[in-house]
Image (spheres, helix red, strand yellow):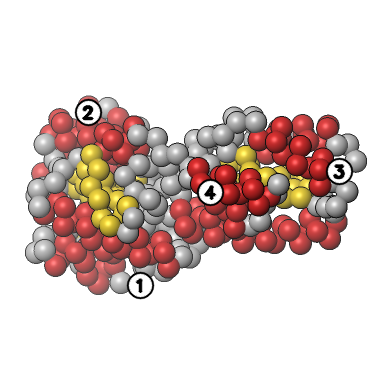
């Protein structure tokens, strides 16, 4: 997100706008935590994870009173448009705010889950899958040395993008994602066939998997194969931090710079995205509600090479 903030500030200055940074998202608008930014204020942040502006889930912004306070604070600073980095909640808040007070917003998709439509990739996703892959590589050493079966849980509340892609990159024998069914049945079948040849296995489970979390699936597997030594690792928030990858920094820079350009051209209620390496604008409504499925070709390819 820092690469995106940097790009927004620098592009805004290029277009002769005054630019302000809002601390802690919508909550900062309500609390008037708004400060003027300069080109220098975003120097030396592109390599940092997290966000220098900080973030929050604002319950108050969900109320008309909270949004009124936010509007009054924007008026004080003469702010006429917003660039919002986030996901569904952020876009929904921006749409309601625009409807009530006429403040135009342009969104930059920021979530490690990569589950927003209107872009091939979201900010943070590439870093997250690289972190997960790195962890899988490390866990593989124990799995191999001790002949264990590992179930590694990755993030993805409602989606399997991280699990599928980190699982392929990490060479997992099986992947569990909420978008597909019967993975345990299929994996058990493959496992039965390979059992005599292969002594350890790695399975990647999306946290939103409908058959349960990694612990539930590992439990079922252990019951079916009592002789195996099953272990579970939940990767958790390590996937949401750390030094961003080059791909993430480039994507975030492109999205941030184009968000300012779009605002300057009078666009509102749209999310910026990169599709097939081109910048695209998608109405918030569509970006929120059109579910982005995982790549079916990848899923099929992976089932072929792991059978
Ligand atoms: O941003 C989405 C996500 O990464 C989910 O995959 C995960 O469940 C969630 O955030 C965790 O959010 P929090 O840190 O608020 O628990």
Q: CA distance from mark 1 to mark 2?
A: 37 Å
Dot 3 corresponds to which residue?
228
Look at the image and tell me in which quarter the N terminus lies: bottom left
**Of the residues under marks 1 and 2, which one precedes in the sequence?**
1
Alpha-carbon neighbours of circle 3 within 10 Å: few (<14), some, or many (≥20)?
Answer: some
Residue at the image position 10 percent from the left and 52 percent from the top? 265
For the residue pair 60 and 205, the one nearer the viewer reads as 205
Alpha-carbon neighbours of circle 2 within 10 Å: few (<14), some, or many (≥20)?
Answer: few
For the residue pair 192 and 240, the one nearer the viewer reads as 192
For the residue pair 251 and 169, the one nearer the viewer reads as 169
Q: Nearer the viewer, mark 3 or mark 4?
A: 4
The answer to the question of whether label 2 and label 3 lie on touching residues, with beta carbons closer than 8 A, is no
**Of the residues under marks 3 and 1, which one precedes in the sequence?**
1
**Ligand 1 within 8 angstroms of badge 2 C-beta:** no
**Of the residues under marks 3 and 4, which one precedes in the sequence?**
3
Q: Nearer the viewer, mark 3 or mark 1?
A: 3
- Disc 3 is placed on an element classified as loop
The answer to the question of whether label 3 and label 1 lie on touching residues, with beta carbons closer than 8 A, is no
For the residue pair 43 and 268, the one nearer the viewer reads as 268
**Ligand 1 within 8 angstroms of badge 4 C-beta:** no
Residue at the image position 33 percent from the left and 55 percent from the top? 276
Residue at the image position 35 percent from the left and 60 percent from the top? 251
- Asked if residue 264 is positioned above or below residue 180 in the image, the reply reads below
- Disc 1 is placed on an element classified as loop
Q: CA distance from mark 2 to mark 3?
A: 57 Å
Residue 94 in view of the camera = no
Dot 4 corresponds to which residue?
298
Dot 1 corresponds to which residue?
44
Dot 2 corresponds to which residue?
65
Q: Position of residue 5 (x, y in %)?
A: 29, 59
Residue at the image position 73 percent from the left and 58 percent from the top? 140
């Amino acid at each position: 997100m820092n690469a995106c903030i940097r790009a927004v500030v620098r592009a805004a200055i290029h277009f002769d706008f005054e630019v302000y940074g809002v601390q802690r998202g919508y909550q900062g608008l309500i609390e008037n935590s708004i400060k003027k930014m300069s080109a220098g204020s975003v120097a030396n942040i592109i390599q940092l994870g997290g966000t220098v502006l900080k973030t929050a889930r604002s319950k108050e912004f969900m109320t008309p009173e909270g949004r009124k306070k936010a509007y009054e604070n924007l008026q004080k600073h003469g702010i006429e448009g917003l660039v919002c980095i986030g996901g569904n909640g952020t876009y929904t808040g921006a749409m309601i705010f625009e409807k009530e007070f006429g403040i135009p917003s342009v969104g930059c998709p920021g979530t490690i889950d990569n589950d927003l439509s209107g872009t091939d990739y979201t900010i943070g996703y590439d870093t997250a899958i690289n972190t997960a892959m790195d962890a899988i590589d490390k866990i593989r050493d124990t799995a191999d040395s001790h002949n264990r079966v590992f179930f590694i849980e990755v993030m993805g509340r409602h989606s399997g993008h991280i699990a599928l892609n980190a699982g392929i990159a990490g060479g997992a024998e099986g992947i569990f994602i909420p978008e597909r069914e019967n993975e345990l049945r299929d994996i058990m079948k493959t496992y039965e066939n390979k059992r005599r040849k292969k002594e350890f296995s790695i399975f990647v489970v999306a946290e939103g998997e409908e058959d349960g979390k990694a612990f539930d699936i590992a439990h079922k597997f252990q019951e079916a194969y009592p002789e195996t030594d099953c272990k579970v690792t939940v990767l958790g928030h390590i996937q949401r931090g750390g030094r961003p990858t080059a791909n993430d920094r480039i994507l975030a820079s492109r999205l941030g710079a184009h968000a300012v350009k779009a605002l300057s051209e009078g666009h509102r209620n749209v999310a910026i995205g990169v599709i097939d390496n081109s910048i695209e604008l998608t109405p918030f409504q569509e970006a929120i509600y059109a579910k982005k499925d995982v790549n079916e070709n990848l899923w099929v390819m992976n089932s072929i090479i792991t059978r």
